[in-house]
Amino acid sequence: MRKLKYVLKRALFRLSPGVAAHCNIDFRLHAPNRAFLENEIFTYVNRLAAESDAGLDFLFVGLDKHNWHYPRLLSVDFHSLDLKKKNAVYGRRGRHKVGNAMQMAELYAENAFDVVVANGLIGFGVDTQADFHRLIAQCHWVLKPGGLLVLGYNDRLERAPFPVDVDGNGGFDEFVPDIVGVRGARHHMDDEHRHVYVFSRKTGHLGNLPNG
């Protein structure tokens, strides 16, 4: 029965993503870290949007079918980025780009976004300390002063064999967001993946962007 429902959802999506969205179709992963992102973190972002006179420009890095429904959960101007061309079908028309998260300065203007969420990149393409520094520099480039960066990763040696120190690069300060149950800038999920969310704000300057 579950497989049949999935097949029908995929068929509707292929027929018309717009109709699928109208029918509230999704392919979400039922995992604690995803639930926390979709509920607590997105509620926090929506609260920030409601408090902003101009609304929020939001970039989600790493789009696929499992997070295709995210624009429906957020009251923001939702943009997305993914390296794989095949995943462009899940993006909003005119709001999705195909490209590398470590080359965002080639795709977006400086100070373009109020919020960047980069979840699940470390150990899945961002594999070295140099890659990580490059990612943080690129996030700094696209964020507005005071902008929010939410970085999510699995705190396991095979995924993150280097220190994931956001504010250690300069230009960011970690902070504790006003989210129920969050008591530190690094929120550890009690799951098999040892998933961690890191909250930080753009505060200073990083100097020149790393190449590539």
Image (cartoon, rainbow, N blue to C red):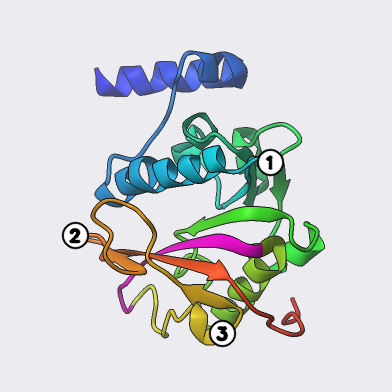
Q: Mark 2 points at which residue?
A: 190
- Could you tell me how far apart the alpha carbons at marks 1 and 2 are, in whole angstroms? 36 Å
Which residue position is annotated with label 3? 169
Please state the horizontal and vertical placement of residue 183, each as a whole percent of the image.
Answer: 26, 65
Q: Nearer the observer, disc 1 or disc 3? A: 1
Measured as percent of width and height from the top left, residue 174 is found at: 45, 73
Amino acid of disc 1: Ala
* Residue 6: quarter of image: top left
- Is 190 rendered above or below residue 202? above
Q: Mark 1 points at which residue?
A: 54
Residue 30, position in %: x, y? 28, 39
Quadrant location of the C terminus?
Answer: bottom right
| Residues in magenta, as a range | 145-157
Q: Distance between the residues labelled 1 and 3?
A: 30 Å
Residue at image x 50%, y 86%? 168
Which residue lies at the image location 51% right of the left edge and 29% below the top edge? 72
In magenta segment, residue 147: yes
